[in-house]
Amino acid sequence: MSSVSVARFTGTVLALMMIIPGCSMAPYTPAPRPAPPPVVDRGVTAPEQPDSPAPMVPEPVYPAAPVARHQPPAVVALLDHAEAQANSGDLDAAAVTLERAIRIDSRNPVLWHHLAQVRLAEGEAVEAEQLATKSNSLAAGNSGLQARNWQLIAEARRMRGEQSGARSAERQAAKLKSR
Amino acid sequence: MARRRKRRRTSRSKKTRRHSLWTKLLLVLSLALAGYLVFLDFQVRHQFDGKRWSLPARVYARPLELYVGLPLTTEQLAKELSALHYRPVQAARQAGDVSRNRNVLHFITRPFVHLDGEESSGNARVSIANGAVSRITDGVSGKAISLVRLEPVMVGSFYPSHNEDRVLVKLEEVPPALINGLIAVEDRGFYSHHGVAPLAILRALWANVRARGVVQGGSTLTQQLVKNFFLTSERTLTRKLNEAIMALLLEWHYDKDEILEAYLNEVYLGQDGKRAVHGFGLASHFYFERPLTELSDEQSALLIGLVKGASYYNPRRHPQRARQRRDLVIDIMAEGELLDPEQAARARSRPLGVSRYQEKAINTFPAFLDMVRRQLRRDYREEDLTSEGLRIFTTLDPQSQWQLEKILDARLARLEKWQDLPDETLEGAAVVTSIQGGEVLALAGGRKPRFAGFNRALDAQRPVGSVIKPAVYLTALEQPDNYTLATLLDDGELTYTAPNGDVWAPHNYDMEFHGMTPLYHALAHSYNVATARLGLALGIKPVIRTLQRLGVEQDFRAYPSLALGAVELSPLQVTQMYQTLASGGFRTPLRAIRAVLAADSEPLQRYPLRVKATVEPASAFLVTTALRYAVRQGTGRALYQELPATLDIAGKTGTTDDLRDSWFAGYTGDRLGVVWIGRDDNQPTGLSGSTGALLVWRDLFAGLDDPAPLQSMVEEIEYRRIDPPSGLLAGEGCQDAVELPFVRGTAPQESAPCAYDAVPVQHPVDWFKELFQ
């Protein structure tokens, strides 16, 4: 893959990120709810416990209302930088920059997608597929990005000569796109 | 006649023979001399052309990146800058200056070549509010800045066996005042002589004769370099001769600047314990904690003065002598018009300005560096590590490391008091990592952080106890059609007879059986019998394969007791196992190194972020949910005695037979920590997982309000309200329902008996009773 297609991809993804609501950072935050009454211990004593506070119930993880989130400026700056590096053909440096962004915003699926792109451009098909899978695991509710990840997985598989795997990934992508 | 002639001939031939003997001797001698010269020439050129110095590898921590929203206190930032030897000043003017006005720090960073290229000097004003960076502006223009990267703290070096150290400098980096001053003081004729200066030697000789001792050296800088470079320091005529010849050869082959640069890097300027301080670059750090480029005139003068005798004029030991010498150098510089009278007067009026000497272990964080070194040894030869000047960029987060060091020893001391144990009987180890990146942020190999001994985090193989249980439950939850968080497990009495006739009858920590209990509850409360039965139902081999998928690369024997943690792992291995769970099922090999660069900053090797999907995200999600219950309701709930309820944590305690090992593994949205406490003699500690290791973990994460969510939503997951006693769907009438996640389509269809009850009235009194139970 040439750096031009990386640039194309980077551009589209950047655009995607701006358009698709809730696709930046963590897509879900627990919805605030009143504290529910604690669970009865049913006579079970917590054996390893010194005097403990009242038991609490962990909050379920709910999908956040799809509100466009503000992209942290530091992450935007790093993305721009990575894009410039990838465009100038310095894929190694672009990967390093994307890792910096991931350290700041580690559950942002777009950043993982970018990294997958760079790895694919470097010919690291196995790594690229794994990173795209990781991106998907963080992209619940964002079918546009998921479709792109599946497209990338298809390319990675084709690069490795896995034609049928590539086709099934493409079917996934198509299915998500039609959503 | 004939006889005479013969005799004459004989004498002539004798003469001829004698003559030819002389010739031969001369020939041999000149050949030997020529050979010797060639030998010296070879030596001179070989040494000078080839690598001139073996440079230790430098190990750097992660560079701190500042951006709005980063959780950081003013104290933490100030400490980081202090570790980078920034100078507190009234108003920041040059690189390395920092001024502070309450919660605003204004500083000027130094240029630094990072692993992705050079970052030039930056001028930043950073405001901190409520434990996070709230604003960053350019110190000059006042415009907002999105990101500032500091230089990384240097945390250690890998030294060659002869313990020479230096920070190489290029000629153009050296302040002109220092170069000119050095020439003025040591070798006025440097730019005109050819390596030796006979007049200077005569002058020195005369001075020495007059003073009846050695008061003056006539050596040129070139000779001094030769002496340091190639020869021993014995004072013999042969050595002097060799020195002169080699100096001439050196001047013949190389130009003045090359020789001068070599001299600046070679000259001996002090001693730091076993470490010999060579060159002005390192001396500047050693005496003033700043790079050469930031030296003031009087500081340059002091270093020039040290050339004459680094130990005699040692400014820390003999400040009086050092000051006289420095002022003499300032005088010479003024005479040579290198300083104007005003500058000279100002320089003389200043104190020595030498930093306080810290008798420090060469490597600040030996346990972490041990890990780095082991990782490097797989890719590099030992001599390359200690001689090639490699620049090693690690993942170490000094803030986490300082915190870990501060709390571990203190907590162990408190636990010893509580348990009536003699001082220093308990040992501990801990690993802190970033969850998504798998980077090792902090590592404790024992409670004494400066002691480079047994690295328990890496090498202590200890029984893990219940810390292993998530692997058993994960194996079950990966079969969503057979097991959900609400599946009732049997915690009733169990006697298992192995095929070889061995009988195994596990019991619970509280010596009771708890009957039928939902799966999440059994893990949260760490019920042994339910877990043992589950392990037997699943088969131990699938559990072993789960462990391996989680990243514990090791073979285990398939005993049923494995399900209860009867296996030995190191804290690092346990960390790897939880890493995969915490990151949603993606295994990332734990990294201590980001990259290795050559001395010229050319990248040699990167250790990039790699992930591998080894566990279904939905299954990892379910296990993490159960582990959230473990710290809210189960064996880990002592955490929330001190931590805010808003901090979302998943964690698991582990305790081994007779309370020999105390474990806690827990994670928040972006950090994972694993703590082990035990004794080196493997005697009981009196501590369970929750009364020992958990408290260390709690101290470690105190003050942390992690904004990152602990779990990312997984599309295949849906929530249902469940009545725990029955494991069925709760209805209006069920009092103590919990909301549990299920893989879509696997939640129970049937409603619990209580769902049909009349809606009960909430009794606030009961609620409070619960609170104070």
Image (cartoon, coloured by chain):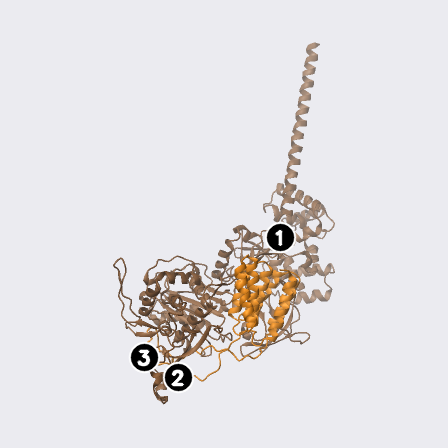
Chain colours: A orange, B brown
Can you see residue B660?
A: no
Image quadrant where residue A131 sits: bottom right
Estimate the x, y position of residue A37 in percent, counting from the top left: 39, 84
Q: Residues within 10 Å of mark 2 (few under 14, many from 20)?
A: some
Q: Residues within 10 Å of mark 1 (few under 14, many from 20)?
A: many
Q: CA distance from mark 2 to mark 1?
A: 73 Å
Q: Label 3 belongs to which residue?
A: A42
- Which mark is on residue B266? 1
Q: Chain of mark 1?
A: B
Q: Label 2 belongs to which residue?
A: A37
* Rendered residue at 66%/33% (across/down): B31
Image quadrant where residue A55 sits: bottom left
Estimate the x, y position of residue B380 in percent, counting from the top left: 53, 52
Estimate the x, y position of residue B6 in percent, counting from the top left: 68, 13
Badge 1 amino acid: Glu
Residues marked 1 and 3 touching at CB (< 8 Å): no
> Which residue sits furthest top?
B1
Image quadrant where residue B238 sits: top right
Please identify, in this view, whether the residue under mark 1 or under mark 3 is nearer the observer.
3
Residues marked 3 and 2 touching at CB (< 8 Å): no
Badge 3 amino acid: Arg
Please identify, in this view, whether the residue under mark 2 or under mark 1 is nearer the observer.
2
Q: Relative to the observer, which residue lies in front, B523 or B73? A: B523
- Which mark is on residue B679? none
Q: Relative to the observer, which residue lies in front, B125 or B211? A: B125
Can you see residue B371?
A: yes
